[in-house]
Image (tube, coloured by chain):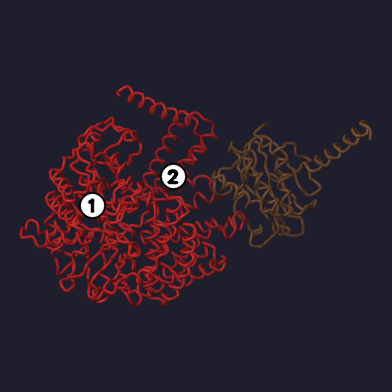
Amino acid sequence: MRKALLLLLCLAAFTCVHAQDVVASCDNETFRHIMDDLVSKGNLCYETSDRFGIKRMMDSISTCLRQRSRNGKLDKMDSLEYTADWYKLQGSYHYENSYYDSTSYMKAHENYQKALKIYRSDSAFEGDLSCEPMIHRELAQLYYKEANYQEAYNHTKMAYDAFVNAADGDVIGYDDSDFLDIQTQMAICQARMGKTTEALAIMDKQIKSYPAKDERYGEALRKKGKILMLREEQGGRKGKNEALNCYQQYFSLKKADALQHFMGMPSAEREQYWMRVRPFVIDCYRLEDADAGFLYNVTLFAKGLLLQLDSAGGGKQNIHATWQMIQERLKPDACAIEFVQYEKYGKQQMGALVLKKTGEPKFVNMASPDSVLQHIVGGRSVKSRLEGTGKGNFIAIDRVYDDSTGVFRLIWNDELLAAVGIEKKVYFSPDGYMHRIAIEYMLPKEVSSWEMYRLSSTRKLLELPPSVTGSKALIVGAVNYSAKNSYVDGDNDIMAYKMMPRGRYENLKTSRQEIDSIYSYRHHTSDVLLSGDDAAEHEFRRQCCEFPIVHISSHGKLNAKEIPFGTDLKSFSSDLSLSESVIAFAGLNTSLSDDAFNPARQQDGILSAKEISSLDMRNVQLVTLACCESGLGQVTAEGVYGIQRGLKNAGVGAIVMTLWEADDDNTTLFMKGFYRRLSKGKTIGQAFQETRQEDFLSADDDNINRSCYRNVFVLVDALE
Amino acid sequence: MSMIRMKKITLIMMCMFAQVCLAQNVGIEDKELASLVDMVKMLRNPTESNFNQVKKLLKADERWTPMNETGKLQSTECKASEGIPGFKLNRIMYSVTKEQKRVSTPGSMLNGEDSRYNYSLYERSLKKGKSATYKLRKRDGKQTFVLVPYVGKKGSLSVLVDGKKRVTTEQEDGTLVCSFDSTGKEISLSVTNRSGAALSFVIINHNSRKK
């Protein structure tokens, strides 16, 4: 083993040295090919918001420049050009990082300015549309994000002038896509500064230049819609109806295109497709009540795309769904709600699209996310109470969920209650903070009889409810985290291993009792129990797809520096929270404590959401996770990017998961009760609700009947 | 027909062909330069197949770069929006360099010191009777500049290099060839349109870097 490891290390060292040698000593042309390739990859990482990818490329570029310079082979123009590229990438890295770290924003500025200085220092860069003009565009984006629209406009104008010069010199056509993008950027900046007439003139000209089925025609329509909304929001002439018309045309084009092409695209292309659609989704919610039916269909469409960015199944029906189809499936006593978080007037807003058995959907304004999260309960804000971790935070959580006159009323305001009316069953799809807060447990007294069903999308109503009657189960628990880990398999999420904090995970004391109870209640001859050393990651992956029921009792972890509350529409592959959300399996301690452990060659006992999403679990109707924080992750328009997202992408039906760190004893109590009821033939929803009601809410023991214990579990996509 | 007679006819035809070639490339010794000139002249016939052929040739050849150092549009030059007939060379070059992903626009990195390229070219358009001066980065060694007017007429253009007449050859179609030794300083190229109408032309340079 030691000899093999030494050989591996030598090979790796040799490879690195050899690569550096190539860059250090090769001819100029080869060097430029290598460097141009690194820069291109860095730019692609920027386009897909992969900040770690940008960092990797930056590190490679600076190493190559250093090596070449040491060998005396780096010529002046190459040094200037690639240093500028490096600064540009560093600026892009910090721009992406500013979603996570507020100081990165200034660093992005500084680096772009350094790149600009280089481009201005030598006339060889003059006229190159990829140099100074592009930096001006990046700076314009930064200023735009800061709401400094005048500066954003100034920089866009500088880029625009360079392109005009190029068009006048017949270098590019007036219909060059970059040129048109810049004009659109200028128009949006002008609109933000109140010059909507000039802005609309630019967009009308663009609309006339394209044939009606051209993608750019659709984009110009969308931008025009945005400008019209901005005009109205600034107190100008009303433009909502005209904007609605633009958005409807755009949506019609986009949906037809998606139905034809989306399912045939590989996942990288689907992701880019979604990146192009998402600005439209963000913008059109500002229409609010202009056409709630249209917004409902847009929401269904957006979630239909998002659920299939990298998934095993779904198909066209996910994109095809409309509110009319859902209405047809609704029972008379039911309603469906799509909650949407969006930005308007520079602030985050929350709305609800309510659909009942008859009539068109209705848009309801709700309290802003900020007013909910900053609501003070017992001297502290809701947000700060929920952000705490560990069992010491249970009291804080209790206070939030017991605040029936405060938080409950903010969320379930009178307008929303009136819109839902007397319906008994409420199927809702959450957004924004609702992925962290179980609003289904915060109903005001007068509607406490509502049956609440949390869904990843109300589109789920078009599917058959998951059913597990008589099905076999894979039950995983009592994991031995210190088991030996010698299974050789390179199919690991290496990032998940790297992000896992080093430490020792204790075996869960009550897990054995929990899984033994479940196993005995069920008394199903085909059930399989994986425990102790056998509860290994590779075993789970090998078997999980064959069982309609999967139960996991283990440590769950979200290795994120912070867990954001807002809606951040990030693309699938770039969002590392899928590697940040993990479930622990046998041998975890062994792999973490071994400095020489190589996750590229051995199973590490860490099953990340990313790895889960690569499995085909369409046969799995129900997954129950007795794992801490299994419901958490980065929040997006589709839902939480964490274990839940991984499971959904794998095709799982219903999921039971936790929103905060669960108490071991009460977790066992819950799961025992849940599976006991399931084994008696109850539906998933019935078993879940009855367990909450009878084993917790009605419990005499105050130690059990606490919000922090009974509200920790949420059920997603059960339908009944 | 006897073998000897056939050989005579073949020899005569070869000589005629050679004369035609020589006539087309009078004053141009470098083969690559000559092929670039021929390629540009192909665009006098603005068919789609010619554009595609030129694009293909440029894509396959990586020894050229657009001569963007000729600088921003001057007041004596025509804008593209004026619709002056021309080679449309710049757009083809831009498209090729974008596909090659080396640079995304013409001109970056070319200057007389850039050892990557020995050939550069660019299209400009002058208004009727007007002149423009292009300041080019320093070049060292034997230089050949070829100016190809869009309208194939002798006397369409005149050029001064650093204020001096350097034209060594004028071809029948108005193509001017200037050959001289450069001493490592900036070169000033002043071009005058004498065609009687607005005129597009291409400047092609071979920077030999040899004395």
Q: Tag 1: residue type? A: Thr
The hue of chain A in the figure is red
Q: For the image shown, how many numbered marks are present on the structure?
A: 2
Callout 1: residue from which chain?
A: A
Callout 2: residue from which chain?
A: A
Looking at the image, residue A684 sits to the left or right of residue A342; the answer is: left
Looking at the image, residue B186 sits to the left or right of residue A522; the answer is: right
| Chain appearing in brown on the rendered image | B
The crowding category of the residue bearing disc 2, from other C-alpha atoms within 10 Å (few below 14, some 14 to 19, many at least 20), is many
Residue B80 pos. (x, y %) = 64, 59
Name the residue at 25% across, 34% down. A591
Q: Is residue A168 above or below residue A9?
A: below
Residue sitting at the far front:
A525
User: Which residue position is annotated with label 2?
Assistant: A42
- Mark 2 lies on a secondary structure that is helix
Name the residue at 33% across, 50% down. A617
Residue A153 pos. (x, y %) = 44, 61
Closest to the observer, A99 or A425: A425
Q: Tag 2: residue type? A: Gly
Closest to the observer, B76 or A320: A320
Name the residue at 33% across, 77% down. A358
The crowding category of the residue bearing disc 1, from other C-alpha atoms within 10 Å (few below 14, some 14 to 19, many at least 20), is many
Q: Visible in this render: residue A342?
A: no
Looking at the image, residue A225 sits to the left or right of residue A356; the answer is: right
Instruction: Measure the alpha-carbon separation of dots 2 and 1.
Output: 40 Å
Residue A470 pos. (x, y %) = 25, 54
Name the residue at 41% across, 67% down. A192
The quarter holding residue A338 reads: bottom left
Q: Visible in this render: residue B21?
A: yes
Closest to the observer, A517 or B197: A517
Q: Are marks 2 and 1 in contact (CB under 8 Å)?
A: no
- Mark 1 lies on a secondary structure that is strand
